[in-house]
Amino acid sequence: MFTRRVVLAVADLGFVRRIIGSPRMYRSLVRRFVAGETLEEALEEIGGIHSRGQRVSLDFLGEKVTEPALAERVVEEYLHLLSTGLPQVNGLDATVSIKLSQLGLDIDREFCAANVRTVLDAAARAERLVRLDMEDSTYVDATLDLYCRMREEGHENVGLVLQAYLRRTPDDVRRLAPYGADVRLCKGAYQEPPTVAFQRMADVRTAMLELSRSMLQGRFTLRLATHDAALIGDLRRMLEELGQRPADVEFQMLLGVGRSLQRQMTDEGYPMRIYVPYGREWYAYFARRLAERPENLRFVARHMFRD
Ligand SMILES: Cc1cc2nc3c(=O)[nH]c(=O)nc-3n(C[C@H](O)[C@H](O)[C@H](O)COP(=O)(O)OP(=O)(O)OC[C@H]3O[C@@H](n4cnc5c(N)ncnc54)[C@H](O)[C@@H]3O)c2cc1C
């Protein structure tokens, strides 16, 4: 069985990058998880999602930006997306998801904060929420600090993500409670050491259930992001027990993952938001999707040794 660490290390090898980056692999595997390299392709994809009665969150791919000019280009893309892209799909319920390391967090915190403010202001004009995706554990403090700062400055249209696999997350929930935060709760997608994150799936599931319960009983707006059918069963039972109707709690899933579950839950009346990433910088995002499901890596391996 491949572990997340092994898959991420293999995906980082130069020759594997070249094979995955080939047009054939892009078409046959990457394209399932990524809406395309351009906004036009992403808009076509979200048109289909909207027609199925689902919501979207758009993510312009990229992370760990080290050049200020690149971070500024990312801001421009989000402004264009908010003012021109999203309005092209009538009646679409859309949010945007951003990564702080793409907006310059590794360059300078104040520069990143200014970039986030610009995106939040544009999103407020478009009446959209901006969610701060959560990256690896070295970014968690800075992401929480920036979230709290934006809320204290009066920005209401900002949400964030918490990862159930992190041992620290119950403390973070306590810190966020006074803000009535809008939180996407997911398991967590990065390679983390045992001192920082639970390693056993059973422990991550238990953490996700306990965190969900405490947030639902608090002042949070909770979004449940998972494709894990067993966990979803437990979450649904818990929601029922807490007197929530299906329409009360949004589930979120990734483009190309758990497609039949997405349809089934939409049909049952659960609000379903699909995370739609697009852009040329898809490699790191795609590698995390490979690491979540070893079959995806086997697919790559089979295609490597063809012709
Ligand atoms: C909307 C959304 C936003 C997210 N945002 C973040 C974030 O900001 N930060 C972060 O760290 N993580 C994020 N994640 C990823 C998350 O942390 C998990 O890594 C990911 O969702 C896989 O966990 P799972 O709960 O779906 O369960 P798993 O047990 O991993 O998967 C359950 C089932 O889903 C299917 N499945 C899951 N992944 C794949 C895949 N890659 N390919 C094919 N099938 C698959 C399989 O059938 C699998 O058996 C997000 C996830 C979602 C849905």
Image (cartoon, rainbow, N blue to C red):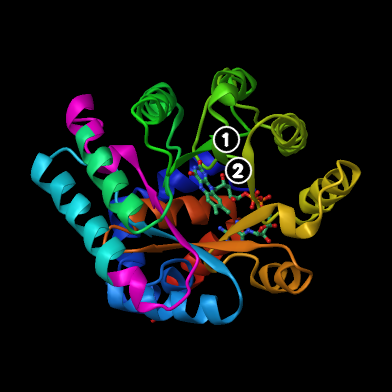
Check residue 37 for magenta coloring.
no
Q: Residue 52's spot in the image, x, y percent?
A: 60, 79
Q: Amino acid at mark 1?
A: Gln
Q: Is residue 306 visible?
A: no
Where does residue 74 sit, x and y in percent of width and height? 21, 52
* Left or right relative to 118: residue 202: right
Q: Residue 104 at what x, y percent from top left?
A: 21, 36
Q: Report the residue at 58% width, 20% height from top.
A: 168
> Is label 1 in a helix, a strand or a loop?
strand
Q: Based on the displayed image, in which of its 4 quarters is residue 266 positioned?
A: bottom right
Magenta extent: 85-113
Residue 186, numbered label: 2
- Residue at 31% x, 45% y is 120
For disc 1, the marked residue is 163
Is the shortest distance between ligand 1 and the CB of mark 2 under 8 Å? yes
Residue in view at x 45 percent, y 74 percent: 46
Q: Was residue 99 drawn as part of the magenta stretch in this picture?
A: yes
Marks 1 and 2 close (CB-CB < 8 Å):
yes
Query: Total label count?
Result: 2
Type of residue at label 2? Cys
Callout 2 secondary element: strand
Estimate how packed mark 2 is, as few (under 14), some (14 to 19) or many (20 or more) residues with alpha carbons within 10 Å: many
Q: Nearer the viewer, residue 249 or 287?
A: 249
Q: Quadrant of residue 294?
A: bottom right
* Image height of 140 relative to 42, above or below: above
In front of the other: 266 or 157: 157
What residue do we see at 37% from left, 32% from top?
154
Residue 249: x, y in percent? 70, 52
State yes or no: Cβ of the residue under disc 1 lies below 8 Å from any atom of ligand 1.
yes
Q: CA distance from mark 1 to mark 2?
A: 5 Å
Q: Quadrant of residue 264?
A: bottom right
